[in-house]
Amino acid sequence: MVAIDYDLEFLEDGRTIDLISIGMVADDGREYYAVSSDAPWDEIKKSDWLVRNVLPSLPLVSRSALDGYLKIPQNSHPKPSLQYVAVNTRDTQVKPQWVIANEVRDFIQATDDAELWANYGAYDHVCLAQLWGPMVALPSGVPMFTNDIQQEARRQGLSWDDLPKQESGEHNALADALHNQTVRRWLAERAQK
């Protein structure tokens, strides 16, 4: 098995999970990152958590409105308008979801006997699988499940605080995927001792 560590940032409302961005790293050194131009940006901008934690790492047309918003304390009102906050569709990392689906499929299929790993990966896997529609539509070579870093940590008797800490880039999908790889490898080394 060859591991692919990944992370997705998404908007979820208890019924649907919409892709915002995806980061993947394979043990052979390949990396993939994309932002969905098809994400529901108006809904995303209504989520204070996504605005504060995810939007800052995305390629934006202008940062000034977002920077103004971020200066306001979390539970203060009124908030500055985010009307002019937009993802830069000219950035090569911003792509339609169908392009992302094809590129992710190719990335995974380029890995013989791929296994997927994510941190708290249940929603990540559902969002990933939905790139191609229902679960029965998963392309050949795309695993039907994701191994979970938290499950492996608990199997080893470890808590969140015992794991290596991410130094920067939290909630940037590629930075999170790279950190997932670090933690997964750390757990694998520890399990062999």
Image (cartoon, rainbow, N blue to C red):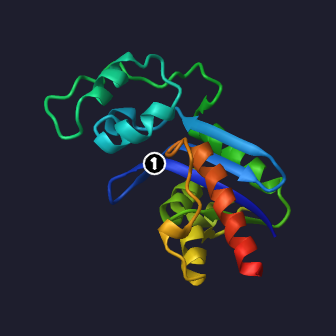
Residue 189 placement (x, y as % from top left): 75, 72
186 vs 166, left or right, is right
For label 1, the residue is 10
User: Which structural element holds mark 1?
Assistant: strand
Picture mark count: 1
* Image location of residue 131, percent across then percent down: 58, 51
- Residue 129 lies, with reference to residue 30, above or below; the image says below
Identify which residue, 28 or 156, lies in the foreground: 156
Tell me residue 62's x, y (percent): 44, 16
Question: Quick one: quadrant of the C terminus?
Answer: bottom right
Q: Quadrant of residue 154?
A: bottom right
The answer to which quarter of the image holds residue 65 is top left
Is the N terminus in the top left, top right, bottom left or bottom right quadrant? bottom right
Measured along the vertical axis of the image, is residue 108 above or below residue 33? Answer: below
Q: Is residue 117 visible?
A: yes
Mark 1 residue type: Phe
Q: Is residue 31 left or right of residue 16?
A: right
Residue occupying the point 39% across, 33% down: 41
| Residue found 66% across the figure and 50% down from its top | 178
How far across and down, in percent of the image, does residue 48 sit?
29, 40
Q: Pick whichever, 96 or 86, lies toward us.
A: 86
Q: Quadrant of residue 49?
A: top left
Residue drawn at (53%, 58%), measured in percent from left and top? 124
